[in-house]
Amino acid sequence: MAVEVRDNPQESRYEIRSDGELAGFVTYGLHRDHITFIHTEIEPAYEGHGLGGQLASAVLDDARRRGLPVVPLCPFIASYIRRHPGEYLSLIKPELQEQVING
């Protein structure tokens, strides 16, 4: 299974594709000084294959690469950060870190 994640700025979302087929996405709002992750969705046929985690990791890594602080309104992205605080907690805007950690 070939998996690819890419930004689709026209739709304001990152998409994950499996063997070329759309398997899921994360919608976002891009702001001057941060990125807000709003909603994550994995197509039912692709659930349970770890694609949600791959997608979360990819979007957070891209935010880091772009130097964009993260506002994780999406419960899935916030949960992923809680499970991987050493890798991603520092990406969250400082005033929101405690709120994300405490759920």
Image (cartoon, grey):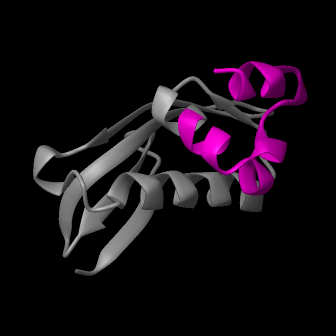
Question: Relative to the observer, which residue lies in front, 78 or 37?
Answer: 78
Say left or right for 36 vs 97: left
Q: Residue at x 49, y 27 (%)?
A: 75
Question: Relative to the observer, which residue lies in front, 84 or 8?
Answer: 84
As drawn, 75 above or below 80: above
Q: Position of residue 53 (x, y in %)?
A: 45, 55
Magenta stretch in the rendered image: 79-103
Picture quadrant of residue 94? top right
Q: Residue at x 70, y 25 (%)?
A: 100
Quadrant occupied by the N terminus: bottom left
Q: Residue at x 81, y 52 (%)?
A: 67
As drawn, 42 above or below 31: below
Residue 52 magenta-drawn?
A: no
As drawn, 87 above or below 44: below
As drawn, 102 above or below 86: above
Quadrant occupied by the C terminus: top right
Say left or right for 48 vs 101: left
Say left or right for 9 vs 69: left
Q: Residue furthest left?
A: 45
Picture quadrant of residue 98? top right
The reply to whether residue 23 is visible in this rendering is: yes
The reply to whether residue 7 is visible in this rendering is: no
Q: Position of residue 55 (x, y in %)?
A: 44, 56
Residue 88 magenta-drawn?
A: yes
